[in-house]
């Protein structure tokens, strides 16, 4: 682990050289920036209450900035610490050097371990993948799209999304993404590139539909789950199951800003805590709360046929795809997950 900075050299107000900007059309009167610390590094101290730490997630709220941030305005995150806290610092300032992160309104800019996480890649750009891409672009992310038919077939979607989107092959998208969404039929999961996804968080939107995918005996007898199959295929990646239990039209319609009374939640499951933190930060940025269902195997509690598959976002209508969409709170999703059992 790198050595700590000298206690006497840490100023009372420490500025992290990671400017972020307001890319919205109106002034921001409040903002929050969330960092994911690199593995093996820590940040401690109350820092006047402006900074909170949960595992590797560091949240800075309105630190040293109480006025409005005008459109196009830029700020550096500042950590205002008490002199007493400077005597025994464990803050690795030099590990948080990131490029500018776009912030729209009160949304969070969510840096990842290697840099500000600005590129979301898609292996599969159909109904769910395309909808997540739209939400990501609206939240300020760059996106790289791919499908099984080649980048030339994605011209319409790229044109719709604008300059923050481009098309590529699956391997190119996997290499380009800071966070990668896999949204393809389960029967094709072995075609997902392995090497370029090593060390990355992969969001798996898949479900098992035997009528489409053919039969997988290990899924038919419930000895494993579809996301666990993808995790075995990607042994060096960190798979998080998400987006699989909501109809794509509802996913696009129900996104809400943080703090909205009618904000919906999505379930996530994964074996890596830091990867789930990244997934939750991304969901927050695109308009959703996250409910942690537990380990990746717990993804079976929100797969087809469970209480939280489709129904909560349609008011539990029998044909949920015919509903225009109904907000489903975090408590609603938690209750449904509990009802699903094992």
Image: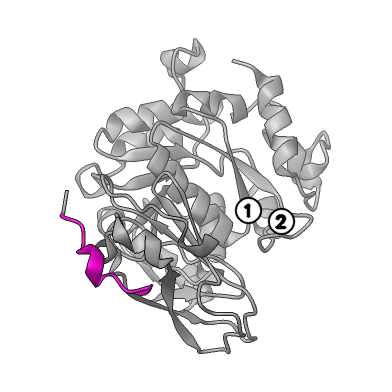
Q: CA distance from mark 2 to mark 1?
A: 8 Å
Where residue 96 appears, x then y in whole percent? 30, 64
Q: Quadrant of residue 99?
A: bottom left
Q: Residue at x 79, y 56 (%)?
A: 261
Where residue 93 appears, x then y in whole percent? 28, 65
Disc with the residue nearer the chain's start (2 vs 1): 2
Q: Is residue 199 above or below residue 226?
A: below
**Pointers 2 and 1 in contact (C-beta within 8 Å):** yes
Taking the view exactly as shown, the residue that stands out farthest to the top is: 221
Q: Which residue is mark 2?
A: 254
Q: Nearer the viewer, residue 276 or 28?
A: 28
Q: Is residue 144 above or below residue 161?
A: above
Q: Which residue is mark 1?
A: 288
- Is 257 a magenta residue? no
Q: Residues within 10 Å of mark 1 (few under 14, many from 20)?
A: many
- Is 7 a magenta residue? yes
Q: Is residue 211 toward the left or the right of residue 341 in the image? A: left
Q: Residue at x 57, y 71 (%)?
A: 31
Magenta residues? 3-15
Q: Residue at x 65, y 52 (%)?
A: 251
Q: Residue at x 31, y 42 (%)?
A: 192
């Amino acid at each position: 682990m790198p050595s700590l900075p000298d206690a006497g050299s840490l100023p009372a107000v420490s500025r992290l050289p990671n400017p972020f900007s307001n890319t919205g059309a109106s002034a921001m009167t409040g903002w929050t920036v969330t960092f994911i610390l690199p593995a093996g590094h820590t940040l401690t101290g109350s820092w006047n209450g402006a900074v909170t730490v949960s595992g590797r997630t560091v949240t800075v709220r309105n630190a040293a900035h109480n006025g409005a941030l005008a459109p196009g305005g830029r700020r550096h995150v500042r950590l205002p610490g008490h002199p007493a806290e400077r005597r025994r610092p464990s803050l690795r300032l030099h590990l948080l050097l990131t490029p500018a992160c776009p912030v729209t309104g009160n949304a969070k800019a969510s840096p990842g371990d290697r840099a500000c996480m600005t590129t979301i890649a898609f292996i599969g750009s159909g109904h769910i993948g395309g909808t997540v891409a739209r939400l990501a672009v609206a939240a300020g992310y760059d996106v790289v799209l791919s499908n099984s038919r080649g980048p030339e077939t994605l011209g319409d979607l790229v044109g719709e999304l604008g300059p923050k989107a481009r098309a590529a092959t699956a391997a190119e998208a996997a290499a380009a993404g800071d966070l990668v969404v896999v949204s393809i039929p389960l029967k094709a999961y072995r075609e997902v590139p392995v090497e370029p996804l090593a060390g990355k968080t992969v969001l798996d939107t898949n479900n098992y539909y035997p009528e489409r995918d053919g039969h997988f005996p290990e899924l038919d007898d419930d000895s494993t789950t579809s996301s666990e199959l993808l995790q075995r295929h990607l042994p060096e990646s960190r798979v998080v199951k998400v987006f699989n239990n909501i109809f794509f039209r509802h996913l696009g319609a129900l996104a809400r800003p943080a703090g909205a009374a009618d904000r919906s939640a999505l379930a996530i499951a994964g074996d890596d805590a830091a990867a789930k933190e990244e997934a939750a930060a991304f969901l927050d940025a695109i308009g959703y709360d996250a409910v942690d269902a537990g380990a990746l195997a717990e993804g079976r509690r929100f797969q087809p046929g469970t209480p939280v598959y489709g129904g909560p976002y349609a008011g539990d209508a029998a044909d949920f795809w015919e509903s225009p969409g109904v907000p489903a709170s975090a408590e609603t999703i938690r209750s449904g997950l509990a009802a699903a059992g094992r």
